[in-house]
Amino acid sequence: MQRVVFDSSFLMAVAQRPTTWVEDTREILGGFEPVILDCVISELKRISMQRGGRARYAALAMKLAEGFSLERCGGATVDAEVVSFAASGGAVVATVDREMIERLAALRIRGVTLKSGRVAPV
């Protein structure tokens, strides 16, 4: 089963605009195991402590990730940890972050993103 590691940008995007992201991901990858890194959870917690809509979406994103497999981070930046996890474990990265998408492409790491409210390969 394909592991998919989710970054905060993807989860906040689907919290903001609910989609059929689970079904879309299954359609693209077949069965998948959703994974979240503890540093991504920490990032979402930090954002959720702020004020405004972004904070609400971060809180909703944490709820979306409650059933995901939790993996530990090392000491690098959150983005570096996500890339490292995907590279070392052959996981797919779910992100809407443009810089992350470019980084994944350069490293030939598979990814998925949202296009017109649907999950699409990077």
Image: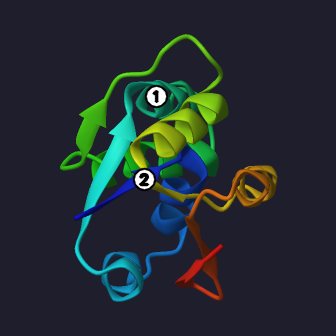
Q: Position of residue 122 (x, y in %)?
A: 66, 73
Residue at (66% x, 62% y) in the render: 96
Identify the residue at image location x=39%, y=85%. Answer: 24
Q: Is residue 54 found left or right of 30 in the rendered image?
A: right
Seen from the viewer's position, the closer of residues 92 and 64 is 92
Callout 1 amino acid: Lys
User: Circle 1 — which element?
Assistant: helix
Measuring 39% from the left and 51% from the top, which residue is drawn there?
60
The tag earlier along the polypeptide, 1 or 2, is 1
Q: Which residue is mark 2?
A: 91
Label 2, residues with CA under 10 Å away: few <14, some 14-19, many ≥20 = many
Disc 1 from disc 2: Cα separation: 24 Å
Residue 53 percent across, percent down from the top left: 60, 51
Per the rendering, the mark at residue 67 is none
Rendered image quadrant of residue 83: top right
Residue on which the image places disc 1? 45
Q: Say whether residue 4 is left or right of residue 7.
A: left
* 21 lies above or below 60: below
* Residue 28 screen position, x and y as percent: 42, 84
The quarter of the rendered structure image containing the N terminus is bottom left
Task: Answer left or right for 22 relative to 52.
Answer: left
Local SS, label 2: loop
Colour approach in the figure: rainbow
Indicate the position of residue 76 as horizontal and vertical percent values.
62, 17
Where is residue 46, by image quadrant?
Answer: top right
- The answer to whether residue 106 is above or below residue 31 is above
Residue 19 position (above or below residue 62): below
Q: Residues within 10 Å of mark 1 (few under 14, many from 20)?
A: some
Amino acid type of the residue tagged 2 in the rendering = Ala
